[in-house]
Amino acid sequence: MKTTYFAAPIAVAIASAAFASHAVADELNVYSARHYDSDERLYDAFTEETGIDVNILEGDSDQLIERIQREGVASPADIMLTVDAGRLWRAEQEGIFQGIESDVLNDRLPESMRHPEGLWFGFSQRARAIFYNRENVDPSEITRYEDLASDDLEYSVCIRSSNNIYNQSLLASLIEHHGEEGAEEWAQGVVNNMARDPEGGDTDQIRGAASGACDLAVANHYYYVRLLKSDDEADREAARKVGIIFPNQDDRGTHVNVGGAGVVDGAPNRENAIQFLEFLASDTAQEIFASGNNEFPVVNSVKRDPVLESWGNFKKDEVNISVLGENNPEAIRIFDRVEWR
């Protein structure tokens, strides 16, 4: 496996010396915005199963999109792999993906995890959960995302900034379920209930709830699992001080987002690319997603990480993930209007 890294926007002008710009029978070129060491196991397993070598170029989503655009018809990119439906939608809007038909993907993936036109697919799930301070909160009183906007929770909530794609997708889901006006009311309520100005990442929100800086926090589930499994006793102690809530179990279900991928328009190794996407839906790949980054597999029959397994099953919002991207621009406008910084 050949891997090329870049971390700055200027790098989009660098020639792709490690990649072939023409079809090669036993190669696949993946542009990845996922930065997990465990993903190397995915590529190695794919190569072992198919004999197809995988070349990886890493950057953030915007860098990868810009690079593919600059490379134009000469781009060697076969696959773009990233996280969050909002980012996949942005790539879609820039014409990065081509639609594909695959009986394997249709059979293995839930409809909610498939773009309606086959432009991209979700292969791992991330639940955006609510965390609560065990000493200060009765979890039976916080059962829905909507509860975070309740008038009696002033100065109670820790949550990231509005430029965070995870929050944008959460609000996009609320737009879908409550309309723009209802979603804006919710966003304004959360702003009113913030215990502090948004700061830091998801782990910082969980730490805030553990320390008592706030009673409630919003974060993706796997950040909590990382604290539980940390080699640092202080991390594990922080995790023990909070509990996890999967919201909206009595109605639509908990909002989930994805790690996903699509075949790049003009991919020189198109058939290899489709084969790779089908591999990502296999039990082998799904187990790597589940164990490598503590994500939920998309294929329900696949064994989950032991911590996730201990939580049992929970109801997930089955809105098609493409909607989260389509509603992203309005979500950003709502955040601006309510001054969610």
Image: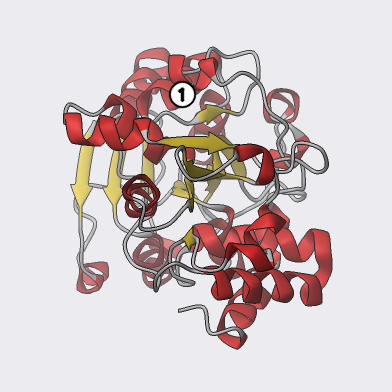
Q: Where is residue 7 in the image (x, y as percent from the top left)?
A: 20, 61
Can residue 89 be seen here?
Answer: no
Quarter of the image for the N terminus: give it. top left
Q: Quadrant of residue 100?
A: top right
135 or 78: nearer the viewer: 135
Figure disc tally: 1
Using residue 182 as the reference point, say whether residue 308 is left or right of it: left
Q: Identify which residue, 329 or 118, lies in the foreground.
A: 329
For residue 10, above or below residue 6: below
Give the amino acid at mark 1. Answer: Ala
In the figure, is residue 130 to the left or right of 239? right
The residue lying toward the viewer, choosing from 277 and 154, is 154
Q: Are there few (<14), some (14-19), or many (20+) residues within 10 Å of tag 1?
A: many
Residue 176 in picture, x, y percent from top left: 79, 61
Residue at x 30% of width, y 34% of height? 227
**In the rendered image, the vertical position of residue 289 relative to residue 20, given as above or below:** above
Which residue is found at the position 35% from the left and 44% from the top?
A: 210
Query: Percent x, y for residue 92?
Result: 60, 62
> Is residue 134 positioned above or below 50 on the image?
below
The residue positioned 63% from the left and 22% from the top of the image is 299
Residue in the foreground of this view, choosing between 99 and 266: 99
User: Colour scheme in the image?
Assistant: secondary structure
Residue 293 image point, x, y percent: 38, 31
Q: Is residue 232 left or right of residue 132?
A: left
Secondary structure of the residue carrying numbered label 1:
helix
Residue lying furthest left: 232
- Circle 1 residue: 290
Q: Evaluate whether residue 72 shows in this view.
A: yes
Q: Quadrant of the C terminus?
A: bottom left
